[in-house]
Image (spheres, rainbow, N blue to C red):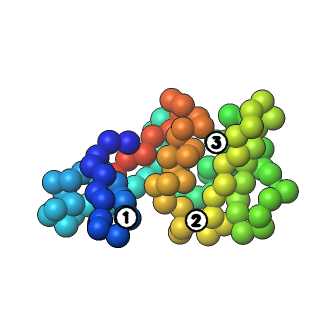
Amino acid sequence: MSGVWVFNTNGVIRLIENPQAESQGSSSSRRKVLVHLPTGEVVSSYSSLEQILTGLGWERYYGGDPDLFQFHKHSSIDLISLPRDFSKFNSVYMYDIVIKNPNVFHVRDM
């Protein structure tokens, strides 16, 4: 993740990934998508994501919060937690998946 961190006077910080686009107002209208690199497909549903993650050794985890869709790997301590509603699946969750699956996923602007 690259960009500029903006600190407001009330102590709140946020990352602006593309400062020029943000100042022009176009960055907020861009949607991020999660791309599966081996196939080049955009992940458009949890069912497609689950298929990919299962192939990578991830399993559904049912022992946590019922409001979350979760995956774990027996070979690690990692847990992927996603909002049950796919419409709330945003770049924060996408980057979590990218970090835990290096060279398999990428986050791009739509």
Q: Which amino acid type is marked by label 3?
A: Ile
Q: Is residue 103 left or right of residue 56?
A: left
Q: Earlier in the sequence, mark 1 or mark 2?
A: 1
Q: Secondary structure at mark 2?
A: helix
Q: Is residue 110 left or right of residue 19?
A: right
Give how far across and how far down residue 86 sits, in percent: 58, 65
Give how far across and how far down residue 108 sits, in percent: 37, 47
Q: Secondary structure at mark 1?
A: loop
Distance of mark 2 from mark 3, alpha carbons? 16 Å
Q: Is residue 50 left or right of residue 4?
A: right
Give how far across and how far down residue 59 sits, in percent: 78, 44
Task: Name the residue rendered at 52%, 40% in the picture.
Answer: 98
Quick check: 80 above or below 65?
A: above
Mark 2, residue position: 86
Q: Nearer the viewer, mark 1 or mark 2?
A: 1
Mark 3, residue position: 52
Quick check: 94 above or below 39?
A: below
Distance of mark 1 from mark 2, alpha carbons? 31 Å
Give how far across and how far down residue 81 sits, in percent: 66, 54
Q: Earlier in the sequence, mark 1 or mark 3?
A: 1
The front one of 107 and 23 is: 23
Q: Nearer the viewer, mark 2 or mark 3?
A: 2
Q: Earlier in the sequence, mark 2 or mark 3?
A: 3
Question: Could you tell me if the residues under marks 1 and 2 are in contact, i.e. CB atoms within 8 Å?
Answer: no
> Looking at the rendering, in which quadrant would you find the C terminus?
bottom left
Question: Could you tell me if the residues under marks 2 and 3 are in contact, i.e. CB atoms within 8 Å?
Answer: no
